[in-house]
């Protein structure tokens, strides 16, 4: 199996962590809209990361890929079966994928992607405004739901935790950190999830790549 893309993308990181936690064997191949093997654009015709290949099966979109991986390897179970827990897990995935990642895109793209990878200055004012006005409101919500157990659903590690922690790791790479004074529960919760080996290895690699 091949996952195409860069783990600095929250969607690629989410997919890699999910596959790792499932104990699946896979390879990560760097790809983006500007580069990558022909199979990447066959899997992802619009050049969006991640793309995925398993034999002759090609598909894109992190949620679609994760759905496939969960079906071919149901255990360990990372998407709850009980109706309410499953619905909450999908909500948290939507929160991470759509709401947090939208804020993160403004910050990470303008502070990191545009200057480092495109050689063009980013809109730093837009990044600063997103961090000042949008990000705290998102963390207010996470603070209100951050559980004492350390996990968002069923008191155990699930896709919900992967999906919320992944875009926040991208934000951190863009120098947007959770304020421990204002959001102590959210900070502690996310930090614990990042300590899992599947996350910690990727984050260390990403920091090293940006420092190079």
Image: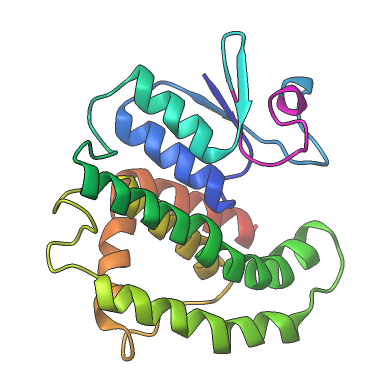
As for residue 44 lying within the magenta part, the answer is yes
Q: Residue 108, percent across and down?
A: 64, 67
Image quadrant containing the C terminus = bottom right
Instruction: Determine the residue positioned at 39% across, 59% down.
Output: 165
Instruction: Determine the residue positioned at 65% across, 87% down.
Output: 129
**Residue 89 falls left or right of residue 112:** left
The magenta region covers 40-52
Instruction: Determine the residue positioned at 73% across, 61% down.
Output: 113
Q: Residue 180: name its quadrant.
A: bottom left
Instruction: Determine the residue positioned at 61% across, 53% down.
Output: 209
Residue found at the far top of this picture? 56
Residue found at the far front of this picture? 83
As for residue 43 lying within the magenta part, the answer is yes
Query: In this view of the protein, which residue sits in the foreground, 30 or 149?
Result: 149
**Residue 89 falls left or right of residue 205:** left
Q: Residue 61, percent across and down?
A: 59, 37
């Amino acid at each position: 199996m091949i996952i195409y893309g860069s783990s600095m993308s929250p969607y690629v990181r989410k997919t890699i962590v999910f596959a790792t936690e499932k104990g699946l064997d896979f390879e990560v191949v760097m790809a983006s809209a500007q580069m990558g093997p022909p199979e990447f654009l066959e899997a992802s015709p619009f050049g969006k990361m991640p793309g995925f290949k398993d034999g002759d099966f090609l598909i894109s979109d992190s949620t679609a890929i994760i759905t496939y991986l969960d079906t071919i390897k149901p255990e360990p179970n990372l998407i709850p079966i009980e109706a309410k827990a499953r619905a909450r897990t999908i909500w948290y995935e939507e929160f991470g994928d759509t709401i947090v990642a939208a804020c993160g895109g403004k910050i990470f793209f303008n502070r990191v992607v545009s200057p480092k990878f495109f050689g063009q200055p980013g809109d730093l004012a837009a990044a600063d405004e997103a961090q000042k006005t949008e990000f705290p409101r998102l963390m207010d919500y996470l603070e209100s739901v951050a559980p004492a157990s350390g996990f968002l659903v069923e008191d155990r590690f699930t896709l919900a935790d992967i999906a919320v922690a992944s875009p926040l790791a991208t934000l951190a790479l863009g120098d947007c950190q959770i304020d421990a004074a204002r959001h102590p529960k959210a900070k502690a919760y996310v930090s614990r999830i990042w300590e899992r080996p599947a996350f910690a290895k990727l984050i260390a690699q990403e920091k090293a790549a940006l420092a190079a």
